[in-house]
Image (cartoon, rainbow, N blue to C red):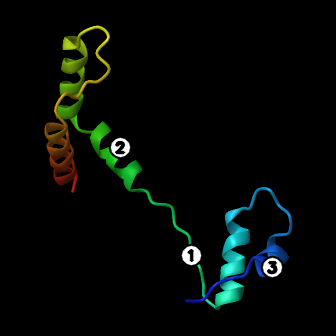
Amino acid sequence: MKFISKETLDKYLGDKSNVNLEDLTQVIEEQFGVVVKIEKNNELERMTKRLSENEELIKKVKKAREARKPGFPSYIRNKEDFLRLVNEASENAE
């Protein structure tokens, strides 16, 4: 397994208290001879969009909000039902 010594890392980064992603990718690329491509994982954004556009889900959340007891911290009482609903919304959006 290849590694970078602390001394080598210090040569690249100096005494920075904060290191940005570009600095780290440069070190990795130069030291290991690879190209690093960083991509944002948009899965959470896609799922949020799908759920926010699902009329059935919106109706259920509104109904749950109306029926919620004061002080009850959550709209979802059954995690399995919620995950099933998320999966259905995902399948219907495709």
Q: At x 32% / y 48%, what residue is drawn?
A: 47
Label drawn at residue 48: 2
Specify whether 83 is left or right of 12.
Answer: left
SS type, badge 1: loop
Nearer the observer: mark 2 or 3; the answer is 3
Instruction: Report which quarter residue 27 is drawn in.
Output: bottom right
Q: CA distance from mark 1 to mark 3?
A: 25 Å
Residue matched to label 3: 7
Say which label, 2 or 3, has the lower sequence index: 3
Nearer the observer: mark 1 or 3; the answer is 3
SS type, badge 2: helix
Q: Is residue 1 above or below residue 58?
A: below
Q: CA distance from mark 2 to mark 3?
A: 44 Å
Choose between 1 and 80: the one closer to the eye.
Answer: 1
Q: Amino acid at mark 1?
A: Lys
Q: CA distance from mark 1 to mark 2?
A: 25 Å
Residue matched to label 1: 37
Q: Quadrant of the C terminus?
A: bottom left
Task: Characterize the local packing of mark 2: few (<14), some (14-19) or many (20 or more) Cα atoms within 10 angstroms.
Answer: some
Specify whether 63 is left or right of 32.
Answer: left
Task: Characterize the local packing of mark 3: few (<14), some (14-19) or many (20 or more) Cα atoms within 10 angstroms.
Answer: few
